[in-house]
Every structure is written in C-alpha cells, then in structure tokens.
C-alpha cells in the first residue's frame, strides 16, 4: 500500500464531466487510506476568472482550499530559478545558459501570459540555439523589443511595500494600512489586485 500525494496540472482545461471524475477518483483513493493529499496547479492569466467563479468554487469543492500565487511579473526574484528549471525541462538538461543581460531583459518583461508565456519564449530560444549561451538577440521579438514600463515598476514596488508592511505587522491589516498611510479599504483592494 503506497501513500500518494497527487499534483494535477491544468484543471482549467477540464470539462465538467472530467472534474466530476477526478473528484470520484480522489474520493476512492482517499477512502482506501492511500491519499496523503492532492493539489491542482491552475495556470492563470491576466484575463482569468475571479476566485468566486463557478470553476474556482468547484476546485475548492475538490481540494478544500486554494493558494494564490502572484503573477510572474510580481515574482522577478524567482525568475532565474524558473528559467533554469524550464530550460532544463525543455532541453532535457543539455548545456544551455542565459547571459546576465538576457536574464535582466527577461526580468523587466511584464509576462502577461505568466509561466506558459515564459515556457513558450524559452522554447523559441532553444529552437534557435539548442546549446550554448542564450543572448538577448536570441529572445523572441516581443520580449527583445519590449521596454520597461514605469507602471509595472511602480506596481512591483507598491506590492513589495505592502508585503513588507504585513510581515512587519504580523499580518495585522489594520496596522499595516496605518504604517503605509492608506485606508484599510485601499489596502484590501490592493491586496486583491496584487493577489497577496
């Protein structure tokens, strides 16, 4: 009897019947005592549905709770790791690396398509240059020619300030709002926007 922890990808692509089937299979495995836990990784984009959509409610019905991961544009510190992991996964661990200029360019891009867009961009790079150092000129044109948008930088700085204030105030939103000099309602709204 093996213990299982299941990670299911792309539930946003499931039909209603498939979602019902997944729930039944998880229930069957769980009733036998083999299931330690299960998680679903939802690929979200700028236009994805809200947390209160029927889709998200159905997922919570299966998995119990959800954890919001901020969009890639708010996680530029994770980018070198994500790039390395994705390149290794796509290339089958062939010797490919990114120049520091390329990583810098990738970190200034807003990534409206999140991880799937990053994966697609890296696939394009590797199809042009399957081994060796990937330079800025190897990036897809949309990324190579993009410029830093001030609003994106301001969003990033504002999000980081909110996260830091919440940490310093042990998650107390009232104190965090006061230390930031904003109304509590503004803090709640910004937390929702930045998925904090």
Image (spheres, helix red, strand yellow):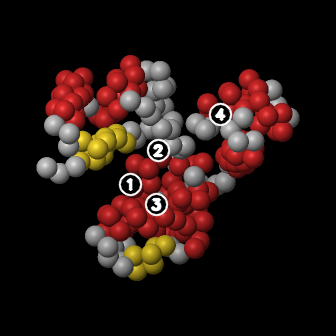
Question: Which of the marked residues, 4 or 1, is nearer the chain's N terminus?
Answer: 1
> Element type at marker 4?
helix
Residue 29 falls in image quadrant:
top left
At 38% from the left edge and 19% from the top edge, which residue is drawn? 54
Q: Is residue 87 above or below residue 162?
A: below
In the image, is residue 175 above or below residue 102? above
Name the foreground residue: 162 vs 175. Answer: 175
Q: Quadrant of the C terminus?
A: top right
Q: Are marks 1 and 2 in contact (CB under 8 Å)?
A: yes
The residue under the point 43% across, 31% down is 65
The residue that appears at 13% across and 49% down in the rendered structure is 1
Pointer 1: what residue? 120
Q: Residue at x 59, y 71 (%)?
A: 101
Find out whether the residues at labels 3 and 1 contact each other: C-beta distance under 8 Å: no
Residue annotated with mark 3: 82
Q: CA distance from mark 4 to mark 1?
A: 29 Å
Write down the residue under mark 4.
Answer: 191
Gap between marks 1 and 2 measured at Cα: 10 Å
Q: Is residue 166 left or right of residue 175?
A: left
Which is in the foreground here, disc 3 or disc 1? 3
Check residue 113 in the rendering and tell me which mark sits there, or answer none.
2
């Amino acid at each position: 009897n093996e213990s299982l922890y299941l990670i299911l990808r792309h539930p946003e692509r499931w039909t209603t019947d498939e979602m019902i089937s997944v729930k039944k299979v998880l229930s069957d495995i769980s009733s036998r005592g083999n299931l330690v836990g299960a998680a679903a990784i939802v690929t979200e984009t700028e236009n994805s549905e809200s947390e209160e959509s029927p889709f998200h409610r159905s997922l919570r019905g299966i998995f119990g709770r959800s954890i919001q991961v901020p969009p890639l544009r708010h996680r530029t510190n994770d980018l070198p790791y994500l790039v390395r992991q994705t390149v290794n996964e796509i290339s089958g661990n062939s010797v490919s690396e990114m120049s520091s200029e390329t990583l810098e360019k990738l970190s200034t891009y807003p990534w409206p398509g999140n991880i799937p867009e990053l994966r697609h961009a890296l696939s394009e790079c590797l199809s042009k240059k399957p081994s060796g150092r990937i330079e800025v000129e190897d990036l897809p044109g949309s990324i190579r020619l993009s410029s830093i948008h001030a609003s994106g930088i301001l969003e990033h700085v504002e999000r980081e300030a909110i996260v830091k204030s919440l940490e310093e105030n042990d998650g107390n939103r009232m104190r965090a709002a006061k230390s930031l000099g904003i109304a509590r309602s503004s803090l709640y709204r910004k937390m929702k926007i930045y998925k904090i």
